[in-house]
Image (tube, helix red, strand yellow):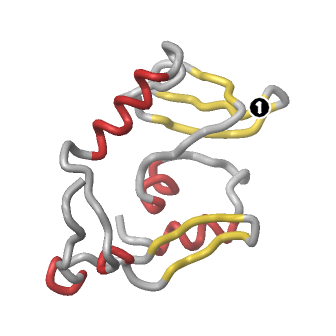
Amino acid sequence: MTAPSTTSPASAGVDGDALFQNDHGVQRMDGNQIDAPSGRISWGMQTVALRLVDSLADGVVRLAEPVLSVGRSAAGLDVRSTSAVWTATDVIVAVPPATAVHAIDFGDHLDPAVRRIAERTPR
């Protein structure tokens, strides 16, 4: 890890809010938290994801396969991509919130408060 960044959001041209959901519901943190002391992984975040994939069973994670929709079914969560449909108990959406709500059809299964906040975040 490299030393914490001292670049402020204003000087870096960073804009937007942080969005997350916990036991208290949807939470929005005003501003971008990037101006707080933090560390960076020198070999890049994709390396973290690829190492995680290597530790899981084959076929658990699908890379470079655009998701068209995520919906509930009696069997769990149905994830439809451009080439197949999978059923899962958990799904990780690893794209910015605004991109997710504009590119993935969640039907009426996405909490309305989450959708509204996600739609207002920068893409």
Q: Which of 12 and 48 is in front in this view?
A: 48
Residue at horizontal 40 percent and vertical 83 percent from the top:
31
Label 1 crowd bin: few (<14), some (14–19), many (20+), radius 10 Å: few
47 in relation to 20, above or below: above
Residue found at x 35% / y 39%: 48
Residue 87: x %, y % from top left? 68, 25
Who is closer to the viewer here, 57 or 2? Answer: 2
Seen at 22% across and 83% down, the residue is: 8
Specify the quadrant that holds the C terminus. Answer: bottom left
The residue at 64%/64% (across/down) is 21
Residue 71 horizontal side relative to residue 31, left or right: right
Mark 1, residue position:
76
27 left or right, relative to 23: left
Left or right relative to 12: residue 99: right
- Answer above or below: position of 83 versus 31: above
Which percent across, then down, holds residue 23?
Answer: 75, 65
| Quarter where residue 92 is shown | top right
Residue at the extreme right of the image, as rendered: 74
